[in-house]
Amino acid sequence: MAGVNGYDWIVPDLSSSNARIKLVAINGSTKKEVISQPFTITPDIYVKGTVVDRSGNPIVNAKVSIGDRYTYTDVNGCYTINRLSPGVYSLKVEKEGVEFEKSQYDNIILSYLNRNTTKNFYEKQ
């Protein structure tokens, strides 16, 4: 996550402790360049996956939580929880009226070296 002048950008596969942004504007024969002050880019740490029923169809609006963070699955049954800190987590899914084969994954280790993982949830047969 890079934060500069109030803007945050998610940069999943780039890491640098001395990044700069160069902006170039050209108007006819006039060219203007501006280079930012150095800043640090920190890779995003996230967990993602899908939640599906017995037939493989998406389960919409299932609550997926990790630590004190949560989100709901979209129309495709997909979820992403990003901007996580390095640590060991438990990931849980909930949906009223639905029982899952496995409703929780424990001991998910996320770090700057192991930045993301995919965990899918399946309705119980």
Image: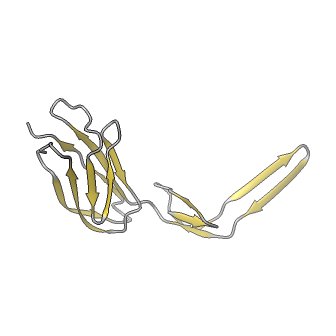
The answer to whether residue 44 is left or right of residue 59 is right
Hey, which quadrant is residue 19 in on the image? bottom right
- Percent from the top left, x then y, of residue 56? 21, 32
The answer to whether residue 30 is left or right of residue 92 is right
55 lies above or below 72: above
- Percent from the top left, x then y, of residue 6? 61, 66
- Percent from the top left, x then y, of residue 106? 17, 61
For the point 21% across and 51% down, the residue is: 93
Give the colour scheme shown: secondary structure
For the point 32% across and 48% down, the residue is: 72
Q: Nearer the viewer, residue 17 or 64?
A: 64
Hey, which quadrant is residue 53 in on the image? top left
Q: Does residue 17 appear anywhere in the picture?
A: no
In the displayed orientation, state which residue is furthest to the left: 125
For the point 32% across and 44% down, the residue is: 73
In the displayed orientation, state which residue is furthest to the front: 96
Q: Nearer the viewer, residue 117 or 78?
A: 78
In the displayed orientation, state which residue is furthest to the right: 29
Quarter of the image that includes the C terminus: top left
In the displayed orientation, state which residue is furthest to the top: 55
For the point 20% across and 46% down, the residue is: 95
Hey, which quadrant is residue 52 in on the image? top left
Count of marks placed on residues: 0
- Percent from the top left, x then y, of residue 38? 64, 70
Q: Does residue 27 appear anywhere in the picture?
A: yes
